[in-house]
Image: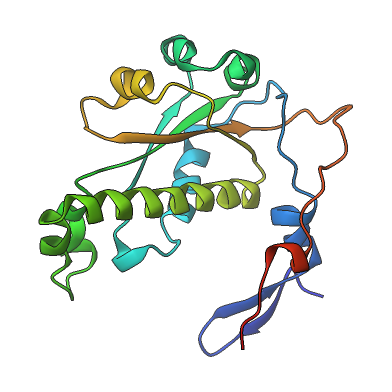
Amino acid sequence: MPALSMIDARQGKIHMLDENGLDLLFRKARTPLRWTTRTVEEDLLRQLYDLTKMGPTSGNCSPARFVFITGSDGRERLRPALSEGNVNRVMGAPVIAIVAHDPLFFEQLPRLCPQENLRSWFASDVGLAEETAFRNGTLQGAYMIMAARALGLDALPISGFDQALVEDAFLAEQGWRANFLLCLGYGDFENQLPRAPRLAFEEACCVIP
């Protein structure tokens, strides 16, 4: 079986990943608690974003913004914002991404979605803009996790941090809002515990005809 199966030759669309692809993204992927010392180059971060940005968002609104912390100075600025239990696992990651969103994302809509007059909707409704930015920014953060796995990286999402401290230290100039942290690198899985259980279809899903 080819690595990517069922390719529509006419449209160039990939209809299904093979078993190895599904394992890489989902079934055998693990969340690391420790990291190797292998570095992550900036070129790989650019590839990571180029994949992430292709995921769908409402009206192509694309509100997510990402700050990649790669050096010791940035880590020390971040340290005071981390909850005690997350310090070691976060500080040991080769890259720490702040997954954020731009509250004024709608200013880009005339370029991102020129067919619709969407900017006016959000510019006149702060609540709608905030809800849309948070929901779609979170969605894009999830796309980044899957893109990281697709590129051979491991990913650890973290929500145990002081949002205000992170925004003051890293996002104040742009006016962006922090959502969660995403540690990126190459995990050290030696002696890692077995995967935690997941809910069965019958527990988590309903099918309504």
Residue 165 drawn at (x, y percent): 36, 18
Give whichever of 97, 42 is nearer the camera. Answer: 97
**Quadrant assignment for the C terminus:** bottom right
- Note whether 13 is above or below 20 in the view shown: below
- Note whether 207 is above or below 81 in the view shown: below
Residue 170 drawn at (x, y percent): 32, 22
Give me the residue at 64% from left, 48% from top.
149
Does residue 114 appear left or right of residue 61 in this picture?
Answer: left
Give me the residue at 53% from left, 90% from top.
10
Residue 148 drawn at (x, y percent): 59, 46
**Quadrant assignment for the N terminus:** bottom right
Quarter of the rendering containing residue 100: top left
- Note whether 148 is above or below 75 in the view shown: below
- Note whether 164 is above or below 209 in the view shown: above
Q: How is the image coloured?
A: rainbow
Give me the residue at 64% from left, 15% from top.
88
Give me the residue at 10% from left, 62% from top.
120
Residue 184 drawn at (x, y percent): 59, 33
Quarter of the rendering containing residue 6: bottom right
Give whichever of 58, 66 is nearer the camera. Answer: 58
Total tally of numbered discs in the picture: 0
Does residue 80 appear left or right of residue 155 in this picture?
Answer: left
Give whichever of 47, 67 is nearer the camera. Answer: 67
